Each structure stands twice: as structure tokens, then as C-alpha cells.
Image (cartoon, grey):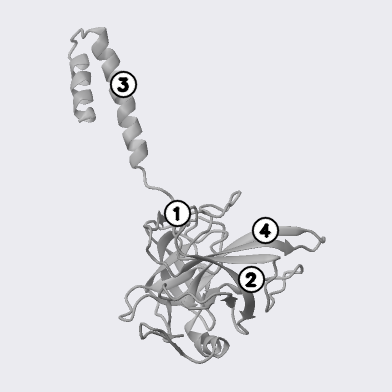
């Protein structure tokens, strides 16, 4: 409506009509209003050029917060990663999220405190669960870790594990609590998502490149460990890979992700026998 009125007033000016001062002021006010509406309608960034996840969706997503990680100079630092719930008491994430002061991946929590926020889309809210990581197991073959939490989560359906090799061209969805840029990165307080497309299949890794909402939709710092999952599996969302490494975000190059189907036997060995829940679902 504002744009229609504004166009009409400007047309009168071009035709040479001497409009009263109040109508000229109205033109200026309407112009500012249109600019404000356009700015408000601009899409929000996410992951890097992704989008915010609606409240309550992808509840298997996990934010890992590490407080007091030892550093080589004897100090402490804080950090964060992303992940996913794959069993009621286990979180899947990147192996490099648990490194000692020398940068070596280890089979234990490295921080004074590592918390896992599960199923909370907006970290400023109260939904989901906040639990503590009490044990870590590192994959012997790729950049994947399993983090055991101190409470059993029964009201969130975990991600299923992919048992078959993905194919070049597959489009996978990513969720994470990372930054939206590599410059002065800060973890997000809102779960974000985007889609990437599979470009290469290697023995332990997959190459992925941005697909939607934009060509340069890519993971950023603190998205490490975030799940790439298929939404087309008949049994529900199925994790295919996790964020491992890549160029500074955003970018249009390949991301290196850690492949899951090749380590399913190891995952099952760590988690233990299959667990039957009250809903009839089995894990892993």
C-alpha cells in the first residue's frame, strides 16, 4: 500500500504539479517506511547463509559447551561444538571436539565441565534437557567421537545411523549451533540449518558443498560434530556424516565430513547391546 501511494505522489512531481509541502513530507515518510519494510523482510543468516530452525524441530540436535579446557601454556579456555543424540544416553559429534592441551584427541572429557543441551532450539528457552558429558570414546578411523551423558533421555527420538554408503549428488541437511562467519566467530544461541550436496565419497570422509538456501551455505566454527542427515529414509532422519573440517565460512568449496556408515560396527560396540524403549524403538 505504501509503495502504491508513494509511486503516485512521485508521478505528480514528474508531471510538474506543485504539491503542498505536507504531501512532499508524506513522500519522504513513506519512502522511509518502504525501506524499513524491505529491511525487515530480508532473510536471516544461519550456519553460514542458512536459516533458523522452527522451535521444536530436529530435537535430536545437541549443543556441547566446554568450560575450562586446558591450554599448552597452563591456562584455560572455553569452546563449543554441535552434535546429535543417537541413543538415549549417547551423543555423536566430532572427535576433535575432545583434545588435550597438545591438540591430541583423547578418550575422555577434556574440560572442567562439558554440558550437552539436547532438544532446545533456542538456548534462551527452557525446553529439552541440559546434561553432563561423563565419558568420551574416539573412533579409531575417522574424526568422530561418542559422548556419554549422565542422564537417559527418553522423550526425544534419536537420529538413526546410516548403514549404507551415500552417493554423489545426495542432498543432506545439516543442523548446528555454530557461528555464521569465520571472522570473530561466536556460537549461535539458536539452532540453524541448511542443505549441502555430496560431491565425493572416500574411505572415511565425504566431500560436501553448499546447496540451499544458497550456494555458499556451509558449516562454521562451533558447528563441528553437527549431523548431516537424510530426510528421505523411511524410518526417519538418518545421520550420514558429521562436520569435520573445511575452509573459512561462508564458501563455495568442499567441506570434509566424517563418514558414519563405515563405523557403525564400532558405534554399536561402544554403545552396547540394542536397547528397546517403551515406544518399541531400538538403539543404535
Please identify the quarter of the rendering in which residue 168 is found. Answer: bottom left
Estimate the x, y position of residue 196 in percent, counting from the top left: 41, 66
Residue hosting label 4: 78
In front of the other: 153 or 64: 153
Report the Cα–Cα distance between label 1 and label 4.
Answer: 22 Å
Q: Residue placed farthest to the right in the image?
A: 73
Label 3 Cα crowd, 10 Å radius (few <14 / some 14-19 / many 20+): few
Q: How many marks?
A: 4
Question: Residue at 50% across / 92% down in the picture?
Answer: 273
Report the Cα–Cα distance between label 1 and label 2.
Answer: 23 Å
Q: Nearer the viewer, mark 1 or mark 4?
A: 4
User: Which structural element holds mark 4?
Assistant: strand
User: Which structural element holds mark 3?
Assistant: helix
In front of the other: 245 or 51: 51
Q: Are marks 4 and 2 in contact (CB under 8 Å)?
A: no
Q: Are marks 4 and 3 in contact (CB under 8 Å)?
A: no
In front of the other: 206 or 73: 73
Q: Earlier in the sequence, mark 1 or mark 4?
A: 1
Label 1 Cα crowd, 10 Å radius (few <14 / some 14-19 / many 20+): many
Residue hosting label 2: 96
Report the Cα–Cα distance between label 3 and label 1.
Answer: 32 Å
Report the Cα–Cα distance between label 4 and label 3.
Answer: 48 Å
For residue 46, the mark is 1
Estimate the x, y position of residue 201 in percent, counting from the top left: 47, 79
Residue hosting label 3: 29
User: Which structural element holds mark 1?
Assistant: loop
Amino acid at each position: 500500500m505504501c509503495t502504491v501511494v508513494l509511486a503516485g505522489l512521485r508521478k505528480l512531481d514528474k508531471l510538474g504539479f506543485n504539491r503542498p509541502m505536507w504531501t512532499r513530507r508524506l513522500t519522504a515518510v513513506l519512502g522511509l517506511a518502504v525501506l524499513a519494510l524491505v529491511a525487515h523482510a530480508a532473510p536471516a543468516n544461519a550456519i553460514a547463509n542458512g536459516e533458523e530452525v522452527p522451535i521444536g524441530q530436529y530435537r535430536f540436535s545437541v549443543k556441547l559447551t566446554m568450560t575450562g579446557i586446558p591450554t599448552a601454556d597452563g591456562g584455560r579456555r572455553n569452546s563449543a561444538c554441535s552434535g546429535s543424540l543417537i541413543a538415549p544416553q549417547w551423543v555423536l559429534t566430532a572427535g576433535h571436539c575432545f583434545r588435550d592441551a597438545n591438540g591430541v584427541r583423547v578418550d575422555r572429557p577434556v574440560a572442567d565441565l562439558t554440558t550437552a543441551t539436547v532438544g532446545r532450539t533456542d538456548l534462551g528457552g527452557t525446553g529439552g534437557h541440559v546434561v553432563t558429558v561423563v565419558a568420551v570414546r574416539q573412533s579409531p578411523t575417522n574424526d568422530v567421537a561418542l559422548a556419554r551423558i549422565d542422564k537417559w533421555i527418553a522423550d526425544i527420538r534419536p537420529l538413526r545411523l546410516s548403514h549404507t554408503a551415500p552417493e554423489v549428488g545426495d542432498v543432506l541437511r545439516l543442523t548446528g549451533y555454530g557461528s555464521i562467519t569465520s571472522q570473530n566467530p561466536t556460537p549461535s544461541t539458536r539452532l540453524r540449518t541448511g542443505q549441502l550436496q555430496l560431491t565425493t565419497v572416500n574411505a572415511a570422509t565425504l566431500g560436501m558443498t553448499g546447496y540451499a538456501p544458497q550456494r555458499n551455505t556451509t558449516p562454521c566454527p562451533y558447528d563441528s560434530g553437527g549431523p548431516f542427515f537424510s530426510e528421505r529414509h523411511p524410518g526417519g532422519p538418518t545421520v550420514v556424516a558429521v562436520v569435520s573440517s573445511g575452509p573459512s565460512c561462508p564458501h563455495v568449496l568442499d567441506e570434509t565430513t566424517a563418514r558414519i556408515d563405515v563405523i557403525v560396527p564400532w558405534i554399536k560396540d561402544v554403545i552396547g547391546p540394542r536397547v528397546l524403549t517403551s515406544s518399541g524403538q531400538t538403539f543404535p
